[in-house]
Structure formats: C-alpha cells, structure tokens
Amino acid sequence: MRNDFMQGNGKANSKDKLTRQVAGARRKLSHEEISNLYADSRIVQNIIDIPAEDMTRNWFTLRMKDEKLARDIMSKLADLNAKNAFKKMRSYERLRGDGFISLGVTQANKFNLADPLDMNKLYSVDYLHAFSSLKVNEFLINEDVFDFNYGQLEKLRINRASRNGIQSVESESSVHISRLLHDQTRRLEDEYQGQSLLEPLYDILTVFDTSIWSVGQILHDFTFKVYKSKDIEELSTEDKRHLSMIMDFMFRTEALAMIGADEELSKQTTPVAGIKDLLDFVWDLLAGAARMPKTVIKGQEAGTITGAQYDVMNYYSRIVADQENEMKPHLEKLIRMLLMSEKELGGRIDPDKIEWEIKFNPLWSVDSKTDAEIRKLVAETDQIYITNGVLMSDEVRETRFGQFGLSNELKFSGDEADFKAIADEVYSAWKERGSNA
C-alpha cells in the first residue's frame, strides 16, 4: 500500500479539519450548567439582565380620562412590586427560555389552580411572584391540530415544594395558564420549553472565556529575564534552582544588576502585535450574537447616547419593540384584572367601557449638543419640504409644536440612523437642484 506523503491532509477527507468540524452540533444545556455559566461570568449576567432592566427601567404611563383611577392603578401596581416582577420574568426568559409570574388572586368562589381564571368573580389581586422553568416539571400544550387553541400552552405541572431548615414538603400542582403570565420568545417547533439564550451563545462564550484566559497568561509572562553564563552548565539542578530564586528576587526588587564581564542579563517581552484585532473579533461576534452593542454589554450608563452611537439607538429601538410586542399584553391583562376586581378600585369596572392606553416612557435621551444638532437638521429638512411643496407650514407647525409647544419627540419613522440617511438624501437632491438652477 503506497501513500504519497506530499499530498498532505487533502480536502474533504478524514484528515481535513474543516470536514471534522460539523456545524449544528447543538449542545443542550441543563439547568445546572445554565446556573454555572450565569454565576461564573459578569459579562453573561450583563447579557441576561441588562435588556430586562432596560425594558422596565422607565416603566410606563397609564393614559386615562379618569386621572384618579389611573393613579390608583399605578399605586396598586407599585404595592404589588409589579415592576420588579416583570424585570425578573424577562431575566428568567432570557436565562432559561421561560419566565413566569404567578397571579395570586382572591375569588368569590372556591377554585382549583387547574381551573381557568374567572374574571367575573375576582375579589382582589394579592401578589405577583416571578419564577422560571426551573420550577416547572411539565408543559402541557394543546396538540390537536383541529382545535382553536392548537399549539398553545394550556397547563403546567409546577413544583410547589417548601423547605424549612432540613425539613421539606414535596408537592406538585397542575396550574391553568390563565393564572400565570408567561414570557417566551424562543421555542423550537418540536419542543415545549423555551430555549435558553445561553445555548446558541455557548460556543462564543467558550471562545470569549479562552481569550480572557489567554490574555491573563500573556500579562503574567509579559516580560521575563534571560541570564547567560558559561558557568550554568556546571551547576547542579539544585544549584540552578537556588540561583534562579536569588536572582529573581534581586533583579525584581533592585534596579542594579551585578554580573560578571562574560555574563549577560536581558529582558524578553511577549509580542502582542495583532492581539487587539483578535479580541475585537471576539467582542464583535459576542455582541452580534447577543444583539447588544459592546458598550451596552460592558455596562455603559443606561439611557445616555451621543450622536454617533447608532448601534445603541438601534438596540433601544429593539427594546421598545419588545415592550410593545412582549410586555404590553401582560401588563394589559394585569390592569384588566385590577379593573375587574371587586375590592381593588372601589368596585368592578368594565375595562372595555373606558378608554385607556399604556404608553411606555422613553428609554434614552441624547446629550444637549446632539439634541441641538438633530433639531437643526429637522428644521432645515422641514424648510426643504415647505419650499418644494411637500408639506404646508401649518402641517409642520402642528407636527413639531402641537398644542403643547416644542415636542420632545420627533415624529419620523425608523431610528436615528434611518433619519440621517433620509436627511442626507434630501440634502443631496436639494444641492443638485440648486446647482442645476
């Protein structure tokens, strides 16, 4: 049997490293592994917790014609510590795939947790407790393809164990989904439980951890001394160890080294050229996979943005979308329960017979210089629209000022980056038109 050693590893054979590396080799993390990853890295904690904190940081304003009723509802939500419960629910969803809030209620009739919640028999909402899928033993999902609620979660089997010192009581209850708020954004079609955000991030987190360890090793051995002497070869192992200890101590603490004329002492430095590019690659990969800017992952001050941070603006736009699509329905359900509770707000109120709206408070604001630049750009753009007959001056006045004076919210679609691109196009067309005139 002959083998041509000049052929090398070859392409797509058993020795090809790219062939042996298989994409899609999923690693499904256990709850213990997820807990260890979270507990071990502050960066992982930032990826999990910061978006949840941003979603609830500035909370929301409840718009109602009856302002006293709105204040009473917000006061009740504060008593329930709802803001903290929603933050924890979102953190659990990102960490373990599912976040829940148990709705502790009092009803006019006896009930079982497995029974659907009857809104018409509510007395009060007493507490909100956030928990994760770590407490859930089984997800019961409707699998009937001809049922109206096909694919929806109907009940949970929840572990209700209690512990007092060394004594514990094991219990389990079937709980109807209407008695819970359930936050889940990532679930594979053939699975019941949501997917932890750390699963698709696992390989990247491994590389990130390796880069941290490697940098630590480089810093530890960044400089080392080389001592050359013809007498070294004649020393025993014990004498070399003793000499190394003495010289390491002396040359580390003293600026003066006394050696023989035929001896040489030099320092060697570990080369670090190109390491910044490698670390930037790891950071960019981590930020892209987590869908969070590097500055946010590193803990930039929340809500403060300079003019060039379009990636941060995009991040906050994504948070706003999550507020509207994920958190708002849960808040509306909770407020409806408070309105329908007989003992909460002075009597049962039909939420469909009054006008009310949840308006999330702004998440970020730009510095004064950037704000002035944006307003100047908007004013110049409005002037171009008026000059070219796109808008009338009355329309611009109503849009920018309204009945309450200068608005803090600039009414345009998209984020700041989109707005700048549109403005640049308008300016280019305007200048071209002026040059042709």
Image (tube, rainbow, N blue to C red):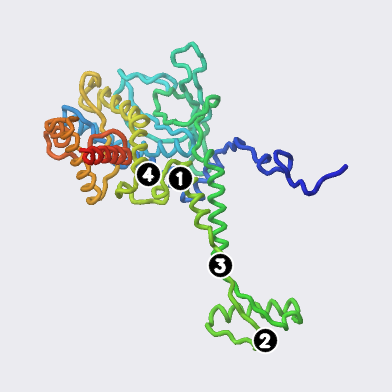
Taking 357 as reference, is 39 left or right? Answer: right
Q: CA distance from mark 1 to mark 2?
A: 55 Å
Q: Is residue 82 left or right of residue 246?
A: left
At label 3, the amino acid type is Phe
Compared to residue 406, the image places residue 213 above or below, namely below
Badge 4 or badge 1: first in the primary sequence:
1
Q: CA distance from mark 3 to mark 4?
A: 35 Å
Q: CA distance from mark 3 to mark 2?
A: 27 Å
Residue underneath mark 1: 287
Q: Which numbered circle lies on residue 222? A: 3
Q: Which residue is label 4 attached to?
A: 311
Residue 100, given in percent of the width and then of the height, sits at 42, 32
Residue 374, labelled with which disc?
Answer: none
Give me the residue at 65% from left, 88% from top: 260
N-term-proximal mark, 3 vs 2: 3
Cβ atoms at labels 1 and 3 below 8 Å apart: no
**N-terminal-most mark, 1 or 3:** 3
